Amino acid sequence: MKLFEYQAKDIFEEAGIPVPKRKLIESASGLDEALSATGFPCVLKSQVLQGGRGKAGLIQFAKTGQEAAEKTGMLFSPEKNVRKILVEEALKIEKEIYLAITIDPVDCSALIMASSEGGMDIEEIALTKPDRIIKEKVNVFRSLMPYQARNIMFGLGLSGEAFKQGVKILTAMFGLFRKYDAELVEINPLALCGDGRLIAADGKFSIDDNASYRQKNFAVSRDHFSNDIEYEASLEGIPYLLFDGKIGLMCAGAGLTNTVYDLINHYGGSVSNYLEFGGPNYRKALEAMKFTLRSNPRVILIVTFGTIARADVMAQGIADAIKELKPEVPIVTAIRGTGEEDAAKILREMGLTPLSDTEDAVREAVRISEGGLK
Amino acid sequence: MSILINKKTKVLVQGITGGEGSFWTKHMLGLGTNVVAGVTPGKEGQSVEGVKVFNTVKHAVKETDADASVLFVPPAFAKDAAFEALSAGIKKVVIIAEGIPIHDAMEIRSAAMSEGAMVIGGNTSGIITAGEAMMGIFPYWIDRVYKKGDIGVMTRSGSLTNEVTAMLIKAGFGVSTLAGVGGDAVPCTRFAELLPLFQKDKKTRAVLMIGELGGTMEEEVADAIESKIFTKPLVAFIAGRTAPKGKKMGHAGAIVTAGKGTVDGKIKALEKAGALTAARPCLAGDLMKEALAR
């Protein structure tokens, strides 16, 4: 789960990492109080999870109360998923530093990346000038050693107070990385200000979903999703993406679902939703079909090849869902795996024609979705 | 021959008294697996399907010389169970659980590497040597997938493995050993680390790799072919060609980031190294024939 900037900064503050004076507002009515905390000039930062906010115009500067009010009114937009704005003091930045900790899955160390050329173009720099990125690998059992923090901070060209502060910030970041089961902790930019202070001007923090059982401080909210259906599906634990095509996908197994998605595109079809109800969800056919129907498909395509996710259990679930939901759109199935003979029998009794080959099923679904007769 | 597991491997089942543990112990025995012991803390003295249960791995190993362990424990306990197996000297561990925290996986892999052990998983169906033995949850009785033969299979998926392997069998091939490295972002064993084993195995003529978008495991396989660590024919199918960028499509490992991990990049790297890549699962069988005829 990705945290919003305001959440990341609260965590940074708790760990002693300097952050700007700031106040979160959820409507324009909170603006005056926020401005009295930040002063002018200030920055108005839309709290959305997508990157590139600056380039998308979702971050605005203001020098006066009137300007701040106008721009706040412009930024708040439920359609663009902007429901919260972080009002901050504008920093006098001399230099932008990039600092991040993530996981290196190959040698299973924590990977620290830093660059003295931080800011909006860091991804470009990573691609074109990889030598400008300083790296340090941290053994998880040995943890971050002081010499490694020094390597990074000297490497960034820091000295004096800024150097000392940099070591402290990186050490605190590493503590947070481990404490909160983070996949990514990133400060970009870490601002070196005119007065010599280092301040985390932005923050990205991503917590491993598999660790949510022991990271109870944070929960996903509607703000994490671009529409209601994806949010509600996530509460059910069902991976779901909404698209604007014609075939409602109900598949089991992420790899197989990705493959069916590819095959639909290969045969010139389009997808109205991606839904995966395998693994622990294989008894949730009813919920899966409800979510699928909400994407307004012209046809539902169900493809499975399960082992633990038994074909007969899934077929029975689908039969029960059809009885309850009475979908008006045609349903194409290729349900295979453990118990597949019984599954085919159940589906035939429902008046369906079960197929056994994935590509046959995909072609049939594409044909129907493009106006062919059932 | 085979890799990782055969009829002689002395298999321990951690979490043997649980629902999944006992159910799959029955089927592992059914295939012919030499399951020598089970472990569930507090249940020593019981037996499951005729297999003796011990309180600790240490005791089980002392009594039975178990040399491999398959874990049927919930994800929150996987780290403890894996470390228990490693500390008892077991060098082959399979973790079935889906949902192991990444930091735990990082510690497990890190420890396995420094101890010269191989931990496979999590989020996997396990490993199976067709017609001989398995550590995992394979419906080996489905003959159109788990037919004995001489093609090694390595995969990140479950259902997709059935789909693609069935195409291989349909084309007349069979499977030597099938190893699932799992669908997580931090698999404890990576594809390229299985290649030296398949290279050495006389019964494996070629390898089918079932990959997916995200991560760099398929690129590492290309590197291993380029540097002649693996010289047998390799055919790959990789899912997620048309996945929208930046969207998380199910598997935690399947995330496209910053130009790396795209299916296009993987295919280019593999083909440059001399591997054949199947654009669709149904082409895997014919491509395997072509690869072997070269």
Image (cartoon, coloured by chain):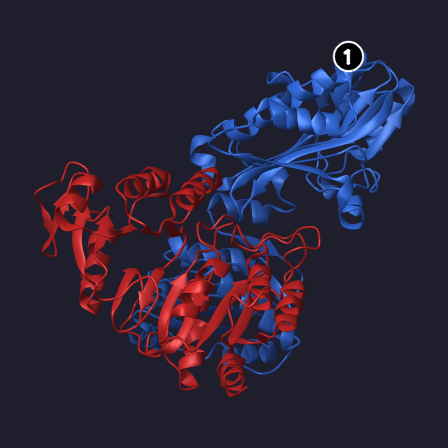
Residue A95, image x, y percentages: 84, 27
The amino acid type of the residue labelled 1 equals: Ala
Q: Is residue B227 above or below residue A104?
A: below
* Residue A368 visible somewhere in the drawing: yes
Residue B23 is left or right of residue A43, and the answer is left
Q: Quadrant of residue B7?
A: bottom left
Residue B264, image x, y percentages: 67, 66
Q: Is residue A56 above or below residue B222?
A: above
Q: Rate crowding at label 1 as few (under 14), some (14 to 19) or many (20 or more) other CA atoms within 10 Å.
A: some
At horizontal 88% and vertical 19% (from top left) the residue drawn is A41
In the image shown, does B62 or A75 lie closer to the viewer? B62
Q: Quadrant of residue B49?
A: bottom left
In the image shown, does B105 or A142 lie closer to the viewer? A142
In the image shown, does B262 or A281 lie closer to the viewer? B262
Chain A on-screen colour: blue
Residue A91, image x, y percentages: 83, 20
Image quadrant holding the N terminus of chain A, namely top right
Q: Quadrant of residue B271?
A: bottom right
The chain shown in red is which? Answer: B
Residue B209 is left or right of residue B72, and the answer is right
In the image shown, does B239 or A264 lie closer to the viewer? B239
* Chain label for disc 1: A
At horizontal 59% and vertical 64% (from top left) the residue drawn is B240
Q: Label 1: which residue?
A: A37
Residue A301 is left or right of residue A11, and the answer is left
Image quadrant holding the C terminus of chain A, namely bottom right
* Residue A296 visible somewhere in the drawing: no
Q: Is residue B280 above or below residue A29?
A: below
Q: Is residue A88 above or below residue B294?
A: above
Residue B31, image x, y percentages: 22, 68
- SS for dot 1: helix
Q: Residue furthest top?
A: A36
